[in-house]
Amino acid sequence: MSQGIRLEVIDLKPPEGCNVILGVSHFIKTVEDLYEAIVNTVPGARFGIAFAEASGPCLVRHEGTDEELRKLAAETMLRIAAGHTFLIILRGFYPINVMERIKHVPEVCRILAATANPLQIIIAETEQGRGVIGVIDGYKSKGIEDEQHIKERKEFLRKIGYKL
C-alpha cells in the first residue's frame, strides 16, 4: 500500500548571463543527443547538460563544453533527482537558438521551462521515486503593459538582434 506523496520545491537560479532549459526525456542517450543538437546548431556554444536516469544505476549523466556549467548542471540535477528529467545551462546564447532542435531530439518528451529567470521546480516524491509536477518561472504578473511598455519591449528585441 502506498505511503502517500511528499511535495518539495527546488530553487534554481541560473548563473549571471545564463539561461536554463528543463525538460523530460527518456533513455540514456539523451545526454549525447542533446549535446549534438546544441553544438550542431550553435558552433562554439558554452553549456552543460545533466540527465537523471530512472532505472538501472539511476545516475546523473552529464556532458558539456563548459566544465563549470557541466558541473553545475550535474549537481543541480542531483538535487532535483527526478527520473528522466534533463537540465541544460547555456551561456552566451539563448534557448530560442536551440529549442527547435531540442524538441526534435527523439528522446525529448516535453520542455518544462526555458528561461533566465529564477525557477522553482515542484517535485512530487513517493516510495518509488521523484517526478517534476510543474515549475514556477519567474514572478507573478503585476499588470498589463501600456504604450510605453510596448515601445520598450520592441526596442529591447531590436537591441538584442531578434527583430529588424
Image (cartoon, grey):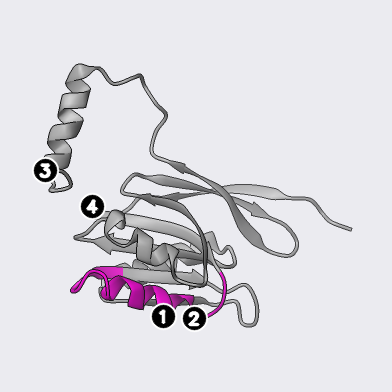
Q: Which residue is mark 2?
A: 29
- At label 1, which amino acid type do we have? Glu
The part of the image, by quadrant, that contains residue 131 is bottom right
As displayed, is residue 66 above or below residue 7?
A: below
From which residue to which does the magenta span run? 26-47
Q: Which residue is mark 3?
A: 164
Crowding around mark 2 (Cα neighbors within 10 Å: few <14, some 14 to 19, many 20+) is some
Crowding around mark 4 (Cα neighbors within 10 Å: few <14, some 14 to 19, many 20+) is few
> Of the residues under marks 4 and 1, which one precedes in the sequence?
4
Q: Can residue 56 be found in the magenta stretch?
A: no
Q: Kindly identify the residue that appears in the image at 18 percent across and 73 percent down.
A: 44
Q: Secondary structure at mark 4?
A: loop
Residue 15 visible to an observer of this rendering:
no
Which mark lies nearer to you, 3 or 1?
A: 3
- At label 2, which amino acid type do we have? Lys
For the residues labelled 4 and 2, the Cα–Cα distance comes to 29 Å
